[in-house]
Every structure is written in structure tokens, then in C-alpha cells.
Image (cartoon, rainbow, N blue to C red):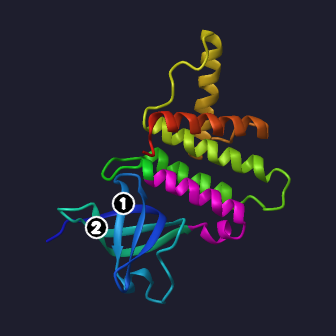
Amino acid sequence: MSELSTTEMLILRKSPYRESSLIAAGITPENGRLDLVVKGELAFSKKKFPVIDLFREIQVEFARSPQSTLHNLCQAEVIADCGEELAAAHDNFLLASELGELILKTAKPDLPCPETFDAALNVLGMLSRIAADEPQAPAKRARCAAMMKLVILSENGLLPEYLDPDPDANVEKHDLLDHILAAAQGLDDPPVNTGRFWTQMNQWADQLIAKAELCG
């Protein structure tokens, strides 16, 4: 009999599988990346409410496959959902999708990623609350992108130790970075900085991700 496991999961991708099933891909704090086969009837609650959907946090029970990283969903219950709010603003949804794909590419099966999981929940929630027509929307989206990427880099041990040749400046920059990482996980308020600052941080994170070949 297959081993049963229970965990929280954030769904970041869903795709058709065979005739009436789908594959839900996402991350969990304890199990890292998780790919689940969802049989048709399990995609809905007893009241025919769709349980499996993008950017939804769910509680899952699944049967582990001994030969594959593709496991079978047994039960699912919705915990939280920001998918509808994200879909209401095209640019927000587009960024959420890009970040979701980045998370899936960098997370590994059976390798815990609690910081990435907490940050993904928090950052997607922040992103879902950005009004499409507000003047600061681009800056806020850049902040969300930078925070998520920096947490991924941090949890993979890929943030540089030396940020400045001046020791005092290096400490100050690391303090700022620690503040950003805490804010990304919902443990603090984001530091108040300009849109240009967040754009530069986002670009820096992209350079580090490319250098590390995290998505290769």
C-alpha cells in the first residue's frame, strides 16, 4: 500500500492529464516541489466547487509513488485563494505566472523550502491587492518580484557574502537585505524605497539567478 502524506500546497500550475484527470504542480514547505495526479472527481468538492486551481493554497492528502515524483491526490481542501483577485488585473496575473514558473523550476522534490513557500503565499497576496490603475502599480510589482526572487536565492544559499568592499557598508546592505527577506515572508513591513530601487533589486536578482543557472 502506498504511503499517505498530508501537507499544505500552493498550486502554481495545472495541466490536463489523460482523458479526465489533470496534474497539479506546486510547492509545499516540507516536501518541496510536489506534482500530483488529480482524478476528475477529486478536482471538485462534494458541492462541485473546484478545489484545484491556480494560486490556491490547499491542504492535501496524497499517496506517494515509490518509483516516481508524480504522486496521486487522495483528498484536498481549500485553505486560501488569491487567484480570482490576480486574474482581475492582467499585469498582476502575468507576473504571478512568471514567479510561479520560476518557483517550480528552482524547487526540488523532497527538498524542504519553507521560506520560499511562506514568501510565495505572502508575495502573491500582496500582488493580488495591487490595483491595476494605481500610479504605483509598476513599482509595487517590481517590489513583489524582487522579494520573491531574493528569497529563492537566499534559501538556495546563492546570495553573495560581500555586497560592498567597505565593511561598514557591507553590514548595512546585509541588514537591508535581511529586512527585505523578512518582509517577503510576511515577518515585517517592506522597506520604504523608490520604484527605481526595486527595479534595480529585481534586475540584480535576475543576474544572480542567471549566473547560478537556477533555471537551467
Q: CA distance from mark 1 to mark 2?
A: 8 Å
Using the image, determine if residue 159 lies above or below residue 47: above
Point 43% across, 32% down: residue: 157
Left or right side of 184 for 29: left
Left or right side of 130 for 184: left
Label of residue 190 in the image? none
Verify whether residue 69 appears in magenta: no
Q: Position of residue 154 (x, y in %)?
A: 49, 35
Q: Quadrant of the C terminus?
A: top left
Point 29% across, 65% down: residue: 70
Q: Between disc 1 and disc 2, whose residue precedes?
A: 1
Q: Badge 2 is on which residue?
A: 71
Magenta stretch, residue numbers: 81-104
Point 64% across, 40% down: residue: 202
Q: Badge 1 is on which residue?
A: 34
Left or right side of 162 for 1: left
Verify whether residue 89 appears in magenta: yes
Tell me, yes or no, whether the two marked residues, 1 and 2, touch with CB atoms within 8 Å. yes
Q: Position of residue 193 (x, y in %)?
A: 76, 36
Q: Position of residue 77 (x, y in %)?
A: 44, 74
Q: Quadrant of the N terminus?
A: bottom left
Left or right side of 65 for 136: right
